[in-house]
Amino acid sequence: MKNQFWLFKSEPKVYSIDDLKKEKTAFWEGVRNYQARNLLRDTIKKGDQVLFYHSNAEPPGIVGICQVVKEGYPDHTQFDEASKYFDPKSKKDDPRWYMVDVKFVKKFKSIVSLETLKNSAGLEEMMVTKRGARLSIQPVTEKEWKTVLKLAGES
DNA sequence: GCCAACGTTGGC
DNA sequence: GCCAACGTTGGC
């Protein structure tokens, strides 16, 4: 199947593009929202490309690209009592939460800020530009992907 | 730090 | 199964 495009949000204070650059690959842990879980478990495939978005940042925006290297599997932090992502209601034989693995691809020379996204033609329907769009894993169209790369000066 | 938006929980 | 209360997200 043709690769799909996504946008993953992360708070840079928790996990930034620089952390991923340093570690090369990472588990995308801690997603605790059912809609996002369904995407991680069922829809996101190996090879899919991902815009890395910094939320709760100054400024918020897209800072780079990563790629899915392992498809959805149970998020081990849900069973770890020491983790802030621990979920006492999740069963080992019926895990509630899933994660994927991603690898670093590139960091943009400069951030494509949320403000820029909102002011760019062709991105009017992009989920992240809509108010109240809190979903941390969002689908991105190929057209939106290309537009963002152009804005970043990377295409 | 405020608060709007929205998801989840729990009493009934 | 409704919905009020509560918690979280995340821009500003």
Image (spheres, coloured by chain):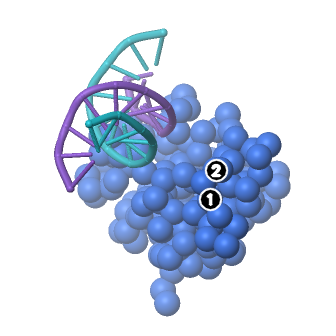
Chain colours: A blue, B cyan, C purple
- Indicate the amino acid at tag 2: Asp
Instruction: Describe residue A25's horizontal placement relative to residue C5 as left or right.
Output: right
* Residue A104 in view (yes/no): no
Query: Between A110 and A57, which is closer to the camera in this rendering?
Result: A57
Q: What chain letter is assigned to the residue under label 2?
A: A
Instruction: Return the residue nearer the eye: A28 or B6.
Output: B6
Relative to residue A92, is residue A2 drawn left or right? left
> Which amino acid type is marked by label 1?
Ser
Residue A154 position within the rendered picture, expressed as x and y whole percent measured from the top left = 55, 59
As helix, strand or loop, the secondary structure at mark 2 comes to loop
Above or below: residue A28 compared with residue A141? above
Q: Residues within 10 Å of mark 1 (few under 14, many from 20)?
A: few
Residue positioned most to the right? A23
The answer to whether residue A2 is left or right of residue A63 is: left
In-image side of A38 versus A30 (left or right) = left
Identify the residue position indicated by label 1 in the image: A90
- Residue at the image position 48 percent from the left and 86 percent from the top: A2
Asked if disc 1 and disc 2 are in contact, CB closer than 8 Å, the reply is yes
Tell me the tag on residue A131.
none
Spot occupied by residue A152 in the image (x, y as percentages of width and height): 51, 52
Residue furthest bottom in the image: A1
Towards the viewer: C4 or A132: C4
Q: Which residue: 26% across, 52% down?
A: A124
Q: Chain of mark 1?
A: A
In x, y percent, where is residue A72?
61, 73
Q: Residue at x 62, y 67 (%)?
A: A95
Residue A29, located in which quarter of the rendered image?
bottom right
Q: CA distance from mark 1 to mark 2?
A: 6 Å
- Mark 2 neighbour density, 10 Å: few (under 14) some (14–19) many (20 or more): some
Give the quadrant of residue A145.
bottom left
Number of numbered discs visible in the structure rendering = 2
- Which residue is denoted by mark 2 in the rendering? A87
